[in-house]
Amino acid sequence: MTVIDPAAGDSTRRQHDLGGLELGPIDRDEHPRTLFEMRVDAMLMLLTHPSCGAFKVDAMRRAVENYSRLDYEQLPYYQRWLKAIRQLLVEQGVLTDEAIDARLALLLTRQESGGH
């Protein structure tokens, strides 16, 4: 079997396709989840639930797998999810980039001023 090295620029293998590559041992220890991770997970569960149906889990996978190699390798796991959630909400017309950016700016202003 020939192993294709994605770092060598082979275009037949996408950045998320790591099957067959020698990447070293996998850390199988359980790690405590952060509040951020739990919130991102909760957002995904709510947005993909049939009662909301903002998008399907398959769309989430497509969004993550279409990241650039740089984004895919440098963004932590739940940051990839959050970026995909934002992209899909905009794609589906649920929110706009401008509305998201305005809300983030408001929250940052509140945080910096010590307000709630």
Image: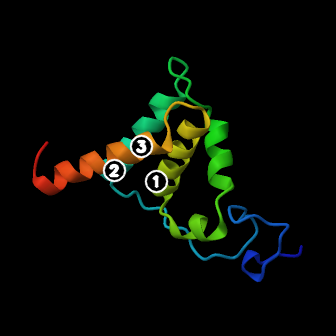
In the displayed structure, 99 sits above or below 28; it is: above
**Residue matched to label 2:** 36
Compared across the picture, whether 91 is left or right of 104 comes to: right
64 or 113, nearer to the observer: 113
Of labels 2 and 1, earlier in sequence is 2
- Distance from the alpha carbon under mark 1 to that under mark 3: 18 Å
Compared across the picture, whether 85 is left or right of 5 comes to: left
Compared across the picture, whether 43 is left or right of 48 comes to: left
Crowdedness of circle 1 by 10 Å Cα count: few (<14), some, many (20+)? some
Q: Residue at x 82, y 75 (%)?
A: 10
Label 1 is placed on what type of residue?
Tyr
Of labels 1 and 3, earlier in sequence is 1
- Image mark for residue 57: none
Label 3 is placed on what type of residue?
Ile
**Residue matched to label 3:** 100
Q: Residue 14: give x, y in percent of width and height.
A: 75, 64
Q: Residue at x 40, y 48 (%)?
A: 101
Determine the secondary structure under disc 2.
helix
Compared across the picture, whether 14 is left or right of 109 comes to: right
